[in-house]
């Protein structure tokens, strides 16, 4: 399915929200037209930062009907899949650089009845997904080194976004290509043009201005990229 006819989705990352007012953040993005929520789980081992775990995901689940996209930046995703399913995650995204066997993670997430995504760091080649890409619901291309919000976008990952989109389309699959890290109204256009269909945005949504306006600007930037792509 070409990116142009794919549903384009904005997924604000709660990592950039005020943790003491998460309920307000969830309401604001829901009212502002977000399509999903992105939850960044960090274990202080796979990445040099610690964020939150299943209890917080469950608390957010109780507040919203938006799909929850759970980004597992943890060393052993296989050990925690059940916990994040029970917490109410809809898509579990694991890193291929983690210690868990990727094909086993894919199999287990699907067995739990959830969608599965595989994430790659900026320096990991797309070929790391070769053995199981046809079973993925989402390919997440990191455009910053995972660990912190508010970093700048690495444009050198765009060819990887393009290659992922081509590969998925060529195989007649419908997986999302997701872009995560430094996505702003200025960088989202290029990512959409390259074929991304799922846009994670943290600081661009929460770090200033009005959430609904920020989301509108991001969506306009994404739509502009799609127009360039079909020309
Ligand atoms: C980085 C996380 C991202 C990040 C997004 O490790 O996976 O989801 O928090 O935040 P921004 O958009 O500010 O880079
Ligand atoms: Zn993330």
Image: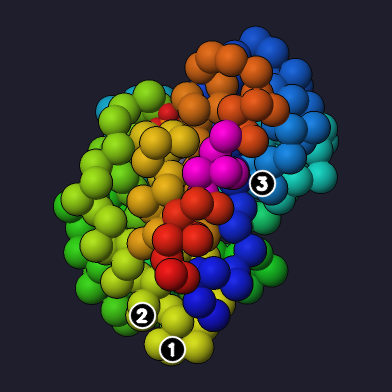
**Discs 2, 1 touching: Cβ within 8 Å:** yes
In which quarter of the view is residue 38 placed?
top right
Residue drawn at 80 percent across, 32 percent down: 31
Q: Mainly helix, strand or loop, the magenta region?
A: helix
Q: Quadrant of ligand 1?
A: top left
Q: CA distance from mark 3 to mark 2?
A: 24 Å
Q: CA distance from mark 1 to mark 3?
A: 26 Å
- Identify the residue position indicated by label 1 in the image: 171
**Mark number for residue 167?**
2
Q: Nearer the viewer, residue 42 or 177?
A: 177
- Residue 43 x, y percent position in the rendering: 40, 34
Judged from the image, the secondary structure of the residue bearing numbered disc 2 is: helix
Magenta residues span 217-222
Judged from the image, the secondary structure of the residue bearing numbered disc 1 is: loop
**Mark number for residue 36?**
3
Q: Is residue 129 left or right of residue 230?
A: left
């Amino acid at each position: 399915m070409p990116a142009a006819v794919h549903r384009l989705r904005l997924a604000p990352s709660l990592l950039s929200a005020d943790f003491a007012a998460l309920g307000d953040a969830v309401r604001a993005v829901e009212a502002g037209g977000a399509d999903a929520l992105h939850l960044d789980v960090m274990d202080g081992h796979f990445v040099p930062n610690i964020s939150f775990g299943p209890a917080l995901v469950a608390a957010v689940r109780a507040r919203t009907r938006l799909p929850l996209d759970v980004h597992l930046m943890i060393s052993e995703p296989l050990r925690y899949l059940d916990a994040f399913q029970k917490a109410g995650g809809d898509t579990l995204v694991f890193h291929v650089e983690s210690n868990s066997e990727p094909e086993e993670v894919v199999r287990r997430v699907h067995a739990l009845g959830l969608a599965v995504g595989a994430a790659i760091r900026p320096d990991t080649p797309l070929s790391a997904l070769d053995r199981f890409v046809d079973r993925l619901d989402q390919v997440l291309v990191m455009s910053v080194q995972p660990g912190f919000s508010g970093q700048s976008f690495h444009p050198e990952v765009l060819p990887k976004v393009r290659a992922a989109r081509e590969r998925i389309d060529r195989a007649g699959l419908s997986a999302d290509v997701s872009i995560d890290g430094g996505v702003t109204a200025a960088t989202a256009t290029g990512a959409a043009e390259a074929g991304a269909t799922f846009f994670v945005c943290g600081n661009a949504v929460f770090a200033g201005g009005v959430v609904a306006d920020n989301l509108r600007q991001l969506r306009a930037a994404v739509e502009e990229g799609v127009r360039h792509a079909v020309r």
